[in-house]
């Protein structure tokens, strides 16, 4: 029997945190990266759907901090700690950063996926959060779901089936 | 305030006309190519959040066939032709003259992909050349690229440039429908997503002040 589970959805450039028994999911990751930070002892987890590597290119005005790697990672940590996560138990998993289209042009935009991945790794290092596993790159879209109890990250793709990391 | 939130109804009407003319020419091209009647809808133009865009045709993980190209020149931006996978398969069958063709048949996938890419190339090409004629602007399409994957993963490529300055986009969506296909509500969609600086150029070329 499959139980009806409570799954919280995270949209593009959004960030949310949940406590078990809730799960958390984001759909249709292309060049964007879905970053999970979790604390398995407290059974809490957060997910950020990150679009861009760097917020410092933005000129003035309010920014949506969930959109950029350099601001979203620390915000995600804060929101997890708020609901009971412990800083020293935090671990990370991530998926996404694909290159969906192939162009012959040298357009930097087409490399945004790998740049997002690099920027997130840099932030995790700064915050001393170990990255346990990742499924990044390639040319497939991904839908990901994380369960704070099992700490499995389930990744669905159209062309390469389902895997768990 | 977000610059896109200042956009008025007059501007949206102008963009609706852009979508109308572009997709109109594409529909004609498709009609000639397949020797079939093709209908199109009134363009749907809307100021939307990124999440609204990814939810636009049924959710970010709906699987679609897509052709994407970058527009370079006076009005940089992204143009997508998005089709239901079954509909794409039917078009491919008609183009290559093989009623049995299936995208799931991995041995023959390449032929179908190539036919679909060419279809997308012709349709997006007619969209852009009509837009260029209308505005007298220079628009250069990049070589198109295709993908059969989740809608959210595909369309988010059109948001990269915009997302650097805004949390909103203007969706210019025109649907085309194959007549005599009563069993389906299947549509093809054109999504035009101009880069941030392109809006004022586009409005000026069409005789509207960007600050109206």
Image (cartoon, coloured by chain):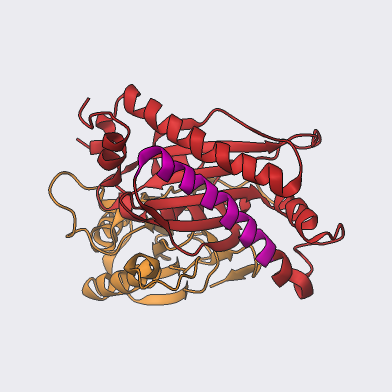
Write the residue at 77% across / 65% down.
B104
Is A164 above or below relative to A78?
A: below
Asked whether residue B134 is in view, the answer is yes
Write the residue at 54% across / 48% down.
B126
Name the magenta segment's main secondary structure.
helix
Image coords of residue A142 (percent x, y): 54, 62
| Residue most extreme to the left | A60
Residue A64 or A18: which is nearer the viewer?
A: A64
B116 horizontally vs A87: left or right: right
Which chain's colour is orange?
A
Image coords of residue B205 (percent x, y): 30, 37
Asked whether residue A21 is in view, the answer is no
Write the residue at 18% across / 59% down.
A57
A148 horizontally vs B66: left or right: left
B83 horizontally vs B4: left or right: right
Let me know if residue A33 is in the magenta part. no
Is A33 above or below relative to B7?
A: below
Residue A107 or B157: which is nearer the viewer?
A: A107
Q: Quadrant of residue A39?
A: bottom left
Residue B40 or A148: which is nearer the viewer?
A: B40
Which chain's colour is red?
B
Is B77 above or below relative to B112?
A: above
Residues shaded magenta: B113-136
Write the residue at 77% across / 51% down.
B90
Let me know if residue B134 is in the magenta part. yes
């Amino acid at each position: 029997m499959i139980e009806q589970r409570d799954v919280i959805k995270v949209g593009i450039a959004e960030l949310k945190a949940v406590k078990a028994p809730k799960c958390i999911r984001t759909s249709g990751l292309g060049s964007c990266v879905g970053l999970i930070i979790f604390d398995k002892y407290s059974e809490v987890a957060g997910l950020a759907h990150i679009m861009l590597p760097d917020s410092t290119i933005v000129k003035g005005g309010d920014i949506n901090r969930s959109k950029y790697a350099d601001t979203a990672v620390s915000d995600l940590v804060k929101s997890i700690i708020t609901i009971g996560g412990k800083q020293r138990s935090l671990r990370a998993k991530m998926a996404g950063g694909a290159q969906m289209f192939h162009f012959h042009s040298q357009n930097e935009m087409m490399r945004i996926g790998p740049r997002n991945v690099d920027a997130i790794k840099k932030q995790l290092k700064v915050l001393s959060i170990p990255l346990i596993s990742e499924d990044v790159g390639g040319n497939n879209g991904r839908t990901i779901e994380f369960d704070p109890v099992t700490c499995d990250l389930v990744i669905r793709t159209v062309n390469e089936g389902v895997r768990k990391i | 305030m977000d610059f896109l939130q200042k956009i008025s109804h007059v501007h949206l009407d102008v963009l609706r006309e852009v979508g109308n003319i572009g997709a109109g020419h594409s529909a004609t091209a498709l009609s000639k190519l397949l020797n079939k009647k093709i209908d199109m809808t009134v363009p749907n133009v809307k100021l939307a959040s990124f999440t609204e865009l990814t939810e636009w045709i049924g959710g970010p993980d709906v699987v679609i066939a897509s052709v994407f190209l970058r527009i370079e020149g006076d009005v940089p931006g992204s143009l997508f032709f998005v089709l239901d996978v079954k509909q794409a398969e039917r078009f491919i069958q008609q183009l290559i003259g093989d009623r049995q063709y299936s995208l799931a048949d991995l041995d023959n996938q390449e032929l179908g992909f190539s036919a679909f890419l060419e279809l997308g190339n012709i349709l997006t090409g007619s969209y852009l050349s009509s837009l260029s004629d209308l505005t007298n602007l220079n628009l250069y399409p990049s070589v198109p690229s295709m993908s059969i994957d989740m809608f959210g993963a595909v369309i988010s490529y059109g948001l990269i440039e915009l997302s650097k300055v805004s949390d909103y986009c203007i969706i210019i969506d025109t649907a085309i429908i194959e007549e005599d296909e009563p069993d389906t509500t299947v549509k093809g969609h054109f999504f035009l997503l101009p880069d941030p600086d392109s809006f004022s150029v586009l409005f000026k070329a069409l005789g509207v002040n960007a600050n109206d």
